[in-house]
Amino acid sequence: MTEAEIDRIIGMAWEDRTTFDVIKDQFGISESEVIKIMRVNMKPSSFKMWRERIHGRKTKHRALANENVQRFVSSDQRHRDKTG
């Protein structure tokens, strides 16, 4: 992966309303792979804070999220149709 891709994955992982499924759709990596990227590329204290923040967070998992929640898509994210 390029440095720009890793930076984008980290940014998306920090966003509360960007699900791990969206990251997988765009980059083809699983939640566990995102966690590994975060662990390697962040200070230990920042990684720990992020893990505590996202642990069990419904908005980070599409299957658990409320269907009525409107998702923000930034201009640098790929745009998808509503089916995926």
Image (cartoon, rainbow, N blue to C red):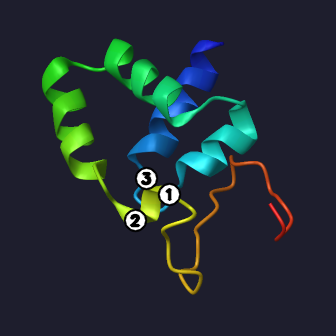
Q: Nearer the viewer, residue 4 or 81?
A: 81
The amino acid type, in three-letter code, at marker 1 is His
Asked whether the residues under the numbered discs 2 and 1 touch, taking CB atoms below 8 Å apart as contact, a structural biologist would say: yes
Instruction: Answer with the quarter of the image where residue 1 lies.
Output: top right
Asked whether the residues under the numbered discs 1 and 3 touch, taking CB atoms below 8 Å apart as contact, a structural biologist would say: no
Badge 3 marks a residue whose secondary structure is loop
Badge 1 marks a residue whose secondary structure is loop
Q: Which mark is residue 15?
A: 3
The amino acid type, in three-letter code, at marker 2 is Lys
Q: In the image, is residue 82 above or below residue 74?
A: below
Q: Along the horizontal axis of the image, is 65 left or right of 57?
A: right
Residue 29: image location, x then y, percent: 64, 29
The residue at the point 54 percent across, 46 percent down is 20
**Disc 1 crowd, CA 10 A, few/some/many (<14, 14-19, 20+):** some
Pick whichever of labels 2 and 3 is earlier in the sequence.
3
Q: Along the horizontal axis of the image, is 30 left or right of 56?
A: right
Q: Along the horizontal axis of the image, is 58 left or right of 61?
A: left
Mark 2 vs mark 3, CA separation in Å: 13 Å
Q: Which mark is residue 61?
A: 1
